[in-house]
């Protein structure tokens, strides 16, 4: 009986988390267009609905009804499965992320996390890095030179940022002595002064930069950079398959925002008079806004600049950070 | 019941994937199946409650197979099949099947006859990661450090091998040509 209840609970949670993250991802595309427009002194989408809000629905209809083209000479099974890998691994990563403090509905305590595994942080980062296979396979199977270049760039991007994100997160893990995201959140109970960002500012900056690379956001969006390689790995994709890539990208953005908030910014603990759940929402929204702000304000960088940055600047810095943290802890 | 379902699902997936790796003539199929198989193996670790090892399996092999893709991209045209030149098909197949059965026999025989028991049984009150740490830094400290030194040697050797060309970054090449 208990097992059945557990299964039902997990399925309900999974469906809720999946639909909320997918919905938030879709909404983030609208916010992105609006924010970018205001930063560039435009209005952005205005015609469909009030302030262009229904543009979202219009885009959805367009994506779903567009013809699904699979070009000649592509390697069909892999071409078809690549967007699915990108989207599904982003959603798998979401499974181990806690969003809100636990609450009680009708005398039943709900833990807002689909699966509370002991190594939550590593699982999320691993699943998110599997997501890079999406662009890579898309690039290799498209039979298109721009796509191939995009795929090659996906490889160097993964090999560069993975080292930085892993090493930068090591110092906070050493301090907190746990890999569970819930324990990390509980470590910072007791107000803003207890946030980890004050103890690990360097790790925070490094992890944020690696997060930008992991989600292919602007300073590092070289795998689909229009001015150099048309549309990179997504050149041959159309309709819903193309849409899946971008749902995955925005889901990854949300995951990274939640991760940064939980590890460095106090997570879902109460902030002054603001209750925990609301504080979490505010932090995640601010992070999404930061993603968009950086996109509006920063130029792209070249692939060799990315490798230079990751291997020659960020990696030594994060090693230094681990060393200093170790000395202080001992 | 769920454990059995999960075990058989993952078994079929892993065997199927590695079957594709061996039998496919297309480099892209083979590499993708290899990546998939490696990631599905982590399912077994999760079933055995070894969460940490499962996640490490995913992270390590994502990066490792990704590097393999980079080489595949340089050496093969993924749109075309690789031409295989096998002369003595029967001998190769017989030998490989025999050696596979032999390996399974060697590995299974002690498990079947002695009913192996763990030397370091899992302790209830310590977590997975702490246990790995304890074992690594007590019983297996020397092999662990040796592996670290070997990796360091390999890394230095790799850097020395490519160092010859290291000064020729794109900007330097342009400077050498007198374009800047």
Image (cartoon, rainbow, N blue to C red):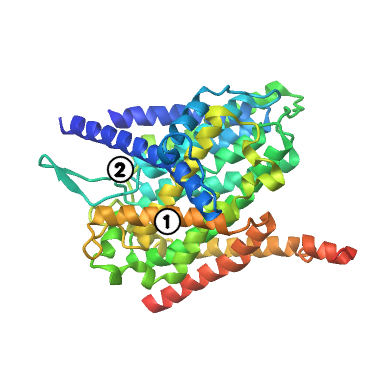
* Local crowd size for mark 2, using a 10 Å CA cut-off: few (<14), some (14–19), many (≥20): some
Badges 2 and 1: C-beta atoms under 8 Å apart?
A: no
Identify the residue at image location x=55%, y=55%: A296
Tell me: A249 left or right of A227: left
Identify the residue at image location x=23%, y=67%: A190
Residue A256's place in the image compared with A13, above or below, is below
Q: Secondary structure at mark 1?
A: helix
Label at residue A115: 2
B154 or A127: which is nearer to us? Answer: A127
Residue A191's place in the image compared with B132, above or below, is below
Tell me: B125 left or right of A151: left
| Residue B74 appears in the figure | yes
Q: Chain of mark 1?
A: A
State the separation of the CA atoms marked 2 and 1.
Answer: 24 Å
B72 or A294: which is nearer to us? Answer: A294
A118 or B156: which is nearer to us? Answer: A118
Q: Quadrant of the C terminus of chain B?
A: bottom right
Task: Give the foreground label among 2 and 1.
Answer: 1
Give the residue at mark 1: A287
Q: Secondary structure at mark 2?
A: loop
Q: Position of residue A33 (x, y in %)?
A: 50, 45
What residue occupies the far left of the structure in this picture?
A107
Instruction: Report which quarter residue A273 is drawn in.
Output: bottom left
A184 or B8: which is nearer to us? Answer: A184
Q: Position of residue A52 (x, y in %)?
A: 45, 38
Identify the residue at image location x=57%, y=50%: A158
Q: Position of residue A39 (x, y in %)?
A: 52, 55
Q: Chain of mark 2?
A: A
* Local crowd size for mark 1, using a 10 Å CA cut-off: few (<14), some (14–19), many (≥20): many
Q: Quadrant of the N terminus of chain B?
A: top left
């Amino acid at each position: 009986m208990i097992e059945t209840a557990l299964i039902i609970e997990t399925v309900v949670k999974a469906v809720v988390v999946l639909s909320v993250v997918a919905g938030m991802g879709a909404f983030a595309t609208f916010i992105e267009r609006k924010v970018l427009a205001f930063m560039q002194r435009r209005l952005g989408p205005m015609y469909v609905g009030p302030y262009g809000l229904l543009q979202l629905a219009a885009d959805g209809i367009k994506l779903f009804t567009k013809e699904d083209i699979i070009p000649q000479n592509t390697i069909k099974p892999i071409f078809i499965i690549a967007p699915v890998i990108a989207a599904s691994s982003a959603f798998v990563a979401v499974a181990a992320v806690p969003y809100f403090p636990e609450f009680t509905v009708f005398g039943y305590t709900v833990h807002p996390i689909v699966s509370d595994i002991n190594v939550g942080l590593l699982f999320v980062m691993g699943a998110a890095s599997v997501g890079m296979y999406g662009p890579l396979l898309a690039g290799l199977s498209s039979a298109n030179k721009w796509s191939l270049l995009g795929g090659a760039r996906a490889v160097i991007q993964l090999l560069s940022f993975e080292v930085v994100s892993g090493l930068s997160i090591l110092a906070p893990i050493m301090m907190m002595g746990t890999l569970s995201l819930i324990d990390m959140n509980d470590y910072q109970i007791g107000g803003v002064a207890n946030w980890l960002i004050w103890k690990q500012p360097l790790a925070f900056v490094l992890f944020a930069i690696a997060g930008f690379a992991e989600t292919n956001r602007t300073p590092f969006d070289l795998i689909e950079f229009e001015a150099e390689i048309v549309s990179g790995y997504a050149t041959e994709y159309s309709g819903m398959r193309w849409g899946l890539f971008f749902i995955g990208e925005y889901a990854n953005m949300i995951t990274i925002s939640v991760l940064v908030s939980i590890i460095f910014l106090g997570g879902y603990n109460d902030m002054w008079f603001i209750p925990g759940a609301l504080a979490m929402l505010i932090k995640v929204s601010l992070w999404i806004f930061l993603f968009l702000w950086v996109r509006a304000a920063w130029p792209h960088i070249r692939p060799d600049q990315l490798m230079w940055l990751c291997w020659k600047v960020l990696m030594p810095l994060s090693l230094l950070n681990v060393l200093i943290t170790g000395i202080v802890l001992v | 019941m769920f454990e059995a379902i999960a075990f058989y699902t993952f078994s079929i997936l892993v065997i199927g994937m590695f079957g594709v790796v061996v039998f496919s003539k297309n480099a892209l199929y083979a590499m993708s199946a290899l990546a998939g198989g490696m990631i599905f193996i982590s399912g077994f670790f999760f079933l055995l409650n070894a969460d940490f090892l499962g996640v490490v399996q995913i992270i390590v092999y994502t990066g490792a197979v990704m590097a393999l893709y980079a080489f595949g991209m340089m050496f093969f045209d993924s749109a075309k099949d690789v031409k295989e030149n096998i002369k003595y098909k029967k001998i190769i197949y017989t030998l490989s099947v025999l050696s596979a059965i032999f390996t399974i026999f060697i590995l299974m025989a002690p498990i079947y006859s002695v009913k192996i028991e763990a030397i370091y049984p899992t302790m209830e009150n310590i977590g997975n990661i702490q246990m790995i740490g304890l074992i690594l830094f007590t019983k297996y400290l020397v092999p662990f450090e040796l592996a670290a030194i070997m990796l360091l040697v390999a890394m230095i050797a790799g850097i020395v091998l490519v160092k010859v060309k290291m000064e020729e970054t794109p900007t330097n090449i342009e400077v050498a040509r007198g374009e800047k």
